Image: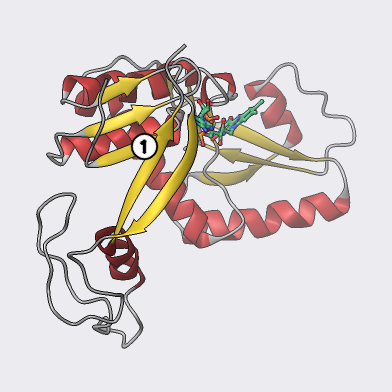
Amino acid sequence: MLDSADVVVIGSGGLGAATAFNLAECGLRRVALVDQHDIGSQTSPRAAGMVSCLRKSGFMIEIIKLAAKKIARLTEETGQPLDWVRSGSLKVARRAEDARVLTDDLRRGVEHGLDVERISPEEARRLNPFLMVQGVEAVLRIGDDMYFDPAQVAVGFARAAEDRGATLLPNTRVTRVLIEKSPGCRGRNGTRDNQHPAGGRRRRSVDSPSSSGQRNRGAACADDAATHRHRADLASPR
Ligand SMILES: Cc1cc2nc3c(=O)[nH]c(=O)nc-3n(C[C@H](O)[C@H](O)[C@H](O)COP(=O)(O)OP(=O)(O)OC[C@H]3O[C@@H](n4cnc5c(N)ncnc54)[C@H](O)[C@@H]3O)c2cc1C
């Protein structure tokens, strides 16, 4: 069994499996994807599979737009199958206060370039014959929304990670994570470049200000990883 890796990803749901895939795709050879159950078998395959683009903040809308593009290109990027369809969706308000929420959503969606419009209850009924239109105050049609088969995503990313050299460790529980200061590295305030113990790459000083003059948070995370050795204790595979 593997006793060391450059990166150990704990949890092989959509998030962990995609992380392992992207690390392997970036060229990291020793990536381990560990799960206490079967790979990609927990929450992720049980999701409804909706990509709902209209969110409460512009930032979230932009993130979901990126996620939607990723889903549409998943097969091309990973070689794994994924059934998806840009079905669009309807948001229906039956109370005046909910209709005001839809008005806000519509404005935000248009600002962020979504294919979103207000339609009449009759038009909504034409699009979805199961919709009961009595008492409907407002309806939005969101053309960008997608549906995908959630059972294929985590497993697909995990298989694609394995194809690129990652090691999958199903039925293996992480029982604790030990974080030890790595002897060859300097502390967070160091200004000298050091070897990254994981990838052998040079890292930048964390305290260099970013262009906006703010502390570079991404670099701070990289620094934590570089100055500390992480050890994950694993239960024996069942
Ligand atoms: C009913 C339902 C419907 C949903 N519908 C949607 C939807 O339509 N659209 C949408 O975008 N999202 C939806 N979601 C949310 C979505 O499913 C989750 O956000 C997503 O699956 C989370 O992925 P994850 O990788 O974080 O978690 P998971 O898929 O749960 O993966 C976490 C993994 O970590 C493993 N793990 C935990 N602890 C350890 C340990 N100590 N050692 C080893 N392994 C460990 C677990 O076994 C598990 O496999 C829905 C969720 C539910 C429950």
Q: Nearer the viewer, residue 169 or 143?
A: 169
Q: Is residue 113 at all visible to an observer of this figure?
A: no
Q: Where is residue 4 in the image (x, y as percent from the top left)?
A: 24, 35
What x and y, as percent, mark residue 10?
A: 42, 35
Give the residue type that dot 1 points to: Val
Q: In this view, does 130 lie above or below 136?
A: above
Res 225 → quadrant: bottom left
Instruction: Report whether 217 appears left or right of 107.
Output: left
Of 181 and 32, nearer the camera is 181
Vertical side of 184 occupied by 38: above or below: above
**Is residue 86 shown left or right of residue 99?**
left
- Residue ID at (36%, 37%): 9
Q: Which residue is drawn at 78% across and 51% down?
A: 99
Q: Residue 211 sits in which quadrant?
A: bottom left
Q: In which quarter of the image is residue 227?
A: bottom left
Looking at the rendered image, the quarter that the N terminus falls into is top left
Q: Where is residue 117 in the image (x, y as percent from the top left)?
A: 58, 46
- The residue under label 1 is 9
Tell me if mark 1 has few (under 14), some (14-19) or many (20+) residues whose alpha carbon lies within 10 angstroms of its own: many
- The percent position of residue 3, horizontal first and vertical second, equals 26, 30
- Kindly tell me whether residue 194 is visible in this rendering: yes
